[in-house]
Amino acid sequence: MEWSVLILFVLLIFIGHRELSAMKYKHKLLERKIDFLLECSGVSLDKHFAVPVQVLDAVKSGNKLKALRLYREETGASLADARKVIEELWPDT
């Protein structure tokens, strides 16, 4: 009985991982298509587009670490991706 439960659990994890990988691929593909359409149409997005207000407030107040933390919490972005966004938003000194 224990082995069958363990095998079922491992199978469910494997299937879930495959589904997640497929969703990530589709997401990246959609991002590439949107970027291509924007590029072809000559439209550019403001660097503040889709950045949560709390993150923009933290940037304005000069709190880079808080901005990074909030951005990651709100968007689920990796530290590297969050750092890129915050660096683009950070005022040059």
Image (cartoon, helix red, strand yellow):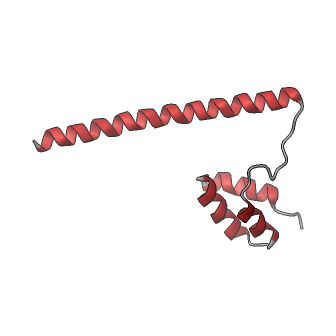
Q: Is residue 16 above or below residue 85?
A: above
Furthest toward the front, the residue is 53
* Viewer-proximal residue among 22 and 83: 22
Question: Which residue is situated farthest in the left direction here?
Answer: 1
Q: Residue at x 62, y 57 (%)?
A: 74
| Image-based side of 90 in relation to 4, left or right | right
Q: Is residue 60 left or right of residue 70?
A: right
Residue 44 position within the rendered picture, expressed as x and y whole percent measured from the top left = 86, 39
Residue at (62% x, 34% y) in the render = 28
Give coordinates of residue 45: x percent, y percent.
Answer: 84, 43
In the image, is residue 91 above or below residue 50? below
Q: How many marks?
A: 0
Where's the N terminus, which quadrant?
top left
At horizontal 77% and vertical 63% (from top left) the residue drawn is 56
Question: Which residue sits at x=71%, y=65%?
Answer: 54
Quadrant in the rendering for residue 40: top right
- Point out residue 41 in the picture as x, y percentages from the top left corner: 87, 28
Counting from the top left corner in percent of width and height, residue 9 is at 26, 41
Q: Is residue 2 left or right of residue 82?
A: left
Q: Quadrant of the C terminus?
A: bottom right
51 versus 63 height, above or below: above
Q: Quadrant of residue 70?
A: bottom right
Q: Quadrant of residue 73?
A: bottom right
